[in-house]
Image (cartoon, rainbow, N blue to C red):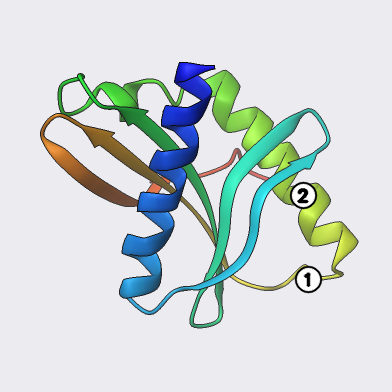
Amino acid sequence: MRQYDSGLRGEAQAEAYLTGLGYVTAARRYRGGDGEIDLILRDGETLVFVEVKARPAGQAGEGLAAVTPAKQRRMTHAALQYLTEREAFGCPVRFDVVEITAAGLRHVPDAFRPREGW
């Protein structure tokens, strides 16, 4: 339960940071297909699918490294489901990662791109 609570706190911290930059929250903890997306926000016209990795005792880079190709694939599947449900194809999208470590919060916009033809 402790890791789960840490994850929820990390997601809240990431959301507060991103909304402070002017992003607008569209969804939290979205589940679709075989994946989950921690946060979905709008950055202007762009839909931003965000993975939050909270590693309070970790080193910078650990959170980003945890977004493996398998995790990216699951996020992409969930994003496709989200776009399908909302008939939002054609809308610009981006996949970001927010990592929270002992070094602080680091936002990595456009952290990865889905495979061609997703």
**Amino acid at the residue labelled 1:** Ala
Q: Nearer the viewer, residue 108 or 19?
A: 19
Task: Name the mark on residue 80.
Answer: 2
Q: Is residue 106 left or right of residue 74?
A: left
Q: Residues within 10 Å of mark 2 (few under 14, many from 20)?
A: some
- Quadrant for the N terminus, please: top right
Q: Are marks 2 and 1 in contact (CB under 8 Å)?
A: no
Cα separation, mark 2 vs mark 1, equals 9 Å
Q: Residues within 10 Å of mark 1 (few under 14, many from 20)?
A: few
Of all residues, the one furthest to the left in this rendering is 103
Q: Residue at x 38, y 79 (%)?
A: 22
Q: Quadrant of residue 10?
A: top left
Q: Is residue 118 visible?
A: no
Q: Is residue 44 left or right of residue 88?
A: left
Q: Nearer the viewer, residue 118 or 55?
A: 55
Q: Residue at x 49, y 38 (%)?
A: 8
Residue 24, placed above or below residue 116: below
Residue 67, placed above or below residue 85: above
Residue 51, placed above or below residue 47: above
Q: Residue at x 86, y 58 (%)?
A: 84
Residue 100 in the image: x percent, y percent? Answer: 27, 37
Q: Is residue 69 left or right of residue 26?
A: left
**Amino acid at the residue labelled 2:** Leu
Q: Quadrant of residue 15?
A: bottom left
Task: Name the mark on residue 88.
Answer: 1
- Quadrant for the C terminus, please: top right
Q: Is residue 21 visible?
A: yes
Q: Residue at x 25, y 26 (%)?
A: 56
Residue 92 in the image: x percent, y percent? Answer: 59, 70
Q: Nearer the viewer, residue 110 or 49?
A: 49
Name the element at disc 1. loop
Task: Name the mark on residue 57.
Answer: none
